[in-house]
Amino acid sequence: MDVFSSPSSGSSSKPSPEAVVQQVQKHLAQAYVQELLQTVGEKCFTKCITKPSTSMSGSESSCVSRCVDRYMEAMGIISRTVINSVPR
Amino acid sequence: MDSSRDTAELQKLLEQEKSRAMLNELVNKLTSVCWDKCVGTPGSKFSSSETACLSNCAQRYLETSALIVRRFTSMQQ
């Protein structure tokens, strides 16, 4: 049974609007996570790995950890600021 | 028939998803830009000046975008 067939439809050919939107949301969420990982990776590499050597030091990896936490926190701050700026 | 109502419903729902995705994109963009401007070496928490900078940065960026739109609009006239 394909994922779009709903109990109410007679045949399995026409997906409901809700089912289509769910698929769209799933794809958007996946793309969002990909983009976020790439951005955070780039930002934190820039901040924490200033002189790449033959292996990652303890301070470099703890910097990256902190960096990820801070970036997510920054996203929260920005997100709240944007939501609160929605024009009346 | 069912299908034209479904199409209208689908269009409405997709518009909502589009708006949501655009808002996420804006937040992503702003976070990226303001992170570069405001954050030094990542510590175990933000300093109050970093927090203020991030918030100010987002607001100024939004104002800048609005300003640019107005400028372009007046150039068209």
Image: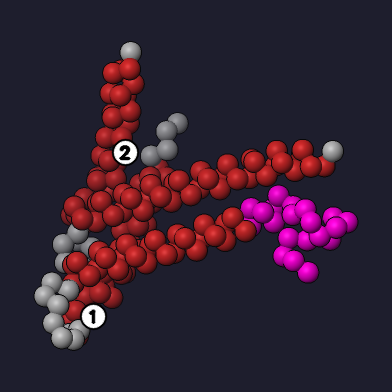
Report if residue A70 is visible in the image: no
Q: Amino acid at mark 1?
A: Ser
Q: Nearer the viewer, residue A73 or B62?
A: B62
The residue singled out by tag 2 in the image is B62
Residue A18, placed above or below residue B16: below
Question: Going 45% across and 31% down the picture, which residue do you hit?
Answer: A88
Q: Residue furthest right?
A: A10
Q: Residues within 10 Å of mark 1 (few under 14, many from 20)?
A: some
Report if residue B61 is visible in the image: yes
The residue singled out by tag 1 in the image is A61
Q: Residue furthest front?
A: A13
Residue B2 in the image, given as x and y percentages of width and height: 82, 42
Is residue B49 toward the left or the right of residue A31 in the image?
left
Q: Nearer the viewer, residue B7 or B69?
A: B7
Provide the residue span drawn in magenta.
Answer: A1-22
Question: Going 25% across and 45% down the picture, which residue do you hit?
Answer: B56
Q: Amino acid at mark 2?
A: Leu
Is residue B4 toward the left or the right of residue B32 in the image?
right
Q: Nearer the viewer, residue A25 or A85?
A: A25
Q: Quadrant of the C terminus of chain B?
A: top left
Magenta includes A49? no
Where disc 1 sits, the SS reads helix
Q: Quadrant of residue A72?
A: bottom left
Magenta includes A11? yes
Q: Please, what is the dominant secondary structure of the magenta stretch?
A: loop
